Amino acid sequence: MSTTSQKHRDFVGEPMGDKEVTALSGIGEILGKKLEQQGFDKAYVVLGQFLLLKKDTEMFTDWLKDASGANSRQAGTCAQCLKEWCDAFL
């Protein structure tokens, strides 16, 4: 089983609030800027997309790769982060 990063644990461990998109595990500065240019400037906006895709991690990772140029690892990390956040707070 893979271990999660501190960034992942921090995000999943508390309410989302008004966090920047770069607070999401798997999303760094470059991917964050690409997402911001498309209107996904906050973590909750990306969460909205995840929920629109009915929490389907495969569809979300495909969307994130298309939208930001994320690789499979980055997209999968972000999807897992959002899934765990949803499991904890929804």
Image (cartoon, rainbow, N blue to C red):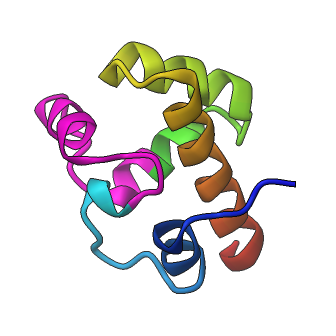
Image position, residue 68 (x, y; %): 32, 24
Q: Which residue is the extreme one toward the top? A: 66
| Residue 25 on the magenta span | yes
Q: Which residues are magenta?
A: 24-46
The x and y percentages for residue 13 are 59, 84
64 over 8 or under it: above or below? above
Residue sitting at 41 percent across and 25 percent down?
Answer: 70
Residue extending farthest to the front is 2
Percent across and percent down for residue 81 are 60, 57
Determine whether, in the image, residue 15 is placed left or right of residue 4: left
Residue 51 visible in the displayed image = no
The picture quadrant where one finds residue 57 is top right
In this rendering, is residue 27 above or below 75?
below
Quadrant, the C terminus: bottom right
Q: How many marks?
A: 0
Location of the N terminus (image quadrant): bottom right
Q: Nearer the viewer, residue 30 or 61?
A: 30
Residue sitting at 34 percent across and 18 percent down?
A: 69
Q: Is residue 27 magenta?
A: yes
Q: Based on the displayed image, in which of its 4 quarters is residue 73 positioned?
A: top right
Which image quarter: residue 17?
bottom left
Position of residue 50 in the picture relative to residue 89 (left or right) = left
Residue occupying the point 46% across, 69% down: 7
